[in-house]
Image: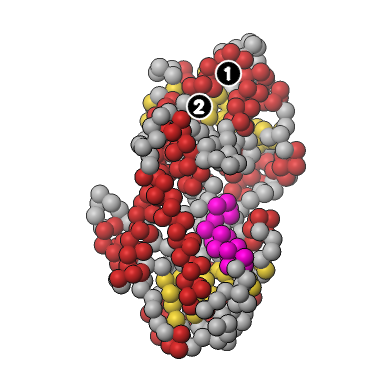
Amino acid sequence: MRITVIGTGYLGATHAACMAELGFDVLGVDIDERKIEQLAAGQLPFHEPGLPELLKKHTASGKLRFTTSFEEAGAWGDVHFIGVGTPQKPGGYGADIRYVDAAALSLAQHITKDALIVGKSTVPVGTARRLACLVQEKHTGPGTIRFAWNPEFLREGFAVKDTISPDRLVIGIEDRDLDAEAILREVYASQLAAETPMIFTDYETAELVKVAANAFLATKISFINAFSEVTEFVGGDIRTLADAIGHDARIGRRFLNAGVGFGGGCLPKDIRALQARVSELGLDRTMRFLTEVDEINLRRRDRVVALTEEILGRLNGATVGILGVAFKPDSDDVRDSPALDVAARLFNAGADVNVYDPQGNANAAKRFPRLNYVDSVPAAVRDAQVVILLTEWQEFKNLHPEDLNGLVANKIIIDGRNVLNVQEWEDADWTVAALGRKFEPSREAIGLNAPV
């Protein structure tokens, strides 16, 4: 069975390399010639642990090839996965699905034999059924085209594992299309052998599973951050609170990490696109709570900026050391990154901002080039009046006070991810402000150097 993957961004490149690892001959397709040349040379244009090795291995073996030709893909492939991006529409909340439409239509016009098209992109509910009909209308060549929707559940930093050993597979097909089901059971035979749950359902449920999962995770993060606002005001320990409720099996501890909030290319845009879609359906009130989820998340960014100003007295002229600008560790993704947003706001308020991220600097510099991007922790914190930890890279979690002593102007750190051992830092005469902890020492107690 020959597999093509349309779109070679984060989702598509990952899926193509992992399908080759599972033993298939794979053809990656994209209209971006430069990206295709990079991938064909075994070069990954983004950071994802474990993926460069698979890409180099299978481009070298010949099991993974890349092309810009839909004509070649349509004549060659048996199963065609669509993994193009669905970004948020400029000036609105809805998802921009023109790239998905274009990929499906190009396939329909170039497929010349029996084939299955499988959508993986995150799309508004109703997209799969519309595209299934459109593909049949536009397909004039020989062969029968079947259609299915198989949403991705990749976590950046764990995408290879999530593709090869997923925690579940969800497949939307039309009216128990047994042929499509049989093909996908063959594609995912190794996962089924590992007893991965495989759920067959209709198109609409498959589409909603992805956005429902992201909406729930976003709600869970904002839930703990709402309580973080309370503990900052009245006192208490947000991490102990999260641990305590996380022991409840009905709740669980994952995603109960208070801090600067969620970002990236999925959760923010997906909850906004869900709100936009249900509004189009006339169900405006149904997902109204997601507006508050989004607002709580954005308020955490406001709080870091305000806390920095409270500590320093003013931001104009301050030197701030920023640790992390990727939206999460083990990723170079800065899309809707709360860390980059905070750094940019501090700069716009007049601070001199030095930034270090193990992988995210280059992408951050493309989006906000005016920050001072440096290549190490010491360079980021040198002469800083305050240090702010905004992405929980292991390198930053492993920091000890003595690593920064003698470099900073003030022994003050804001833990925007609640990952430091506060007692250790305070015992070393550092002032630690952590989101979710009450913070009100006097300026004299801080021992603050300029600005004032």
Q: Which of 51 and 68 is in front in this view?
A: 68
Give me the C-alpha separation between circle 2 and circle 1: 12 Å
Who is closer to the viewer here, 347 or 237?
347
Please name the predominant secondary structure of the magenta segment in the image. helix
The percent coordinates of residue 129 (x first, y second) are 48, 22
- Element carrying mark 2: helix
Q: Let me know if residue 342 is in the magenta part.
A: yes
Tell us which disc is closer to us: 2 or 1. Answer: 2
Q: In which quarter of the image is residue 15?
A: top right
Q: Residue at x 42, y 71 (%)?
A: 434
Q: What residue type is labelled 2?
A: Thr
- Who's the residue at 60% across and 77% down the image? 318
State whether residue 96 appears in this view.
Answer: yes
The residue shown at (43%, 63%) is 259
Q: Position of residue 325 (x, y in %)?
A: 57, 61
| Up-down relation of residue 258 to residue 18 (above or below) | below
Left or right position of 69 against 194: right
SS assignment at label 1: helix
- Structural crowding at the residue carrying mark 1, measured as other residues with C-alpha within 10 Å and reported as few (<14), some (14–19) or many (≥20): many
| Chain part drawn in magenta | 333-348
**Residue tagged 2:** 127
- Left or right of 43? Residue 191 is left
Locate residue 61 relative to residue 185 in the image: left or right. right
- Residue hosting label 1: 135
| Figure quadrant of the C terminus | bottom right
Q: Which of 342 and 257 is in front in this view?
A: 342
Q: Quadrant of residue 368?
A: bottom right
> Residue at image x 55%, y 40%?
92
The amino acid on which the numbered mark 1 sits, given as a three-letter code, is: Val
Query: Where residue 170 sits: x, y (%)?
Result: 42, 32
> Where does residue 196 sit, x and y in percent of width and height?
39, 37
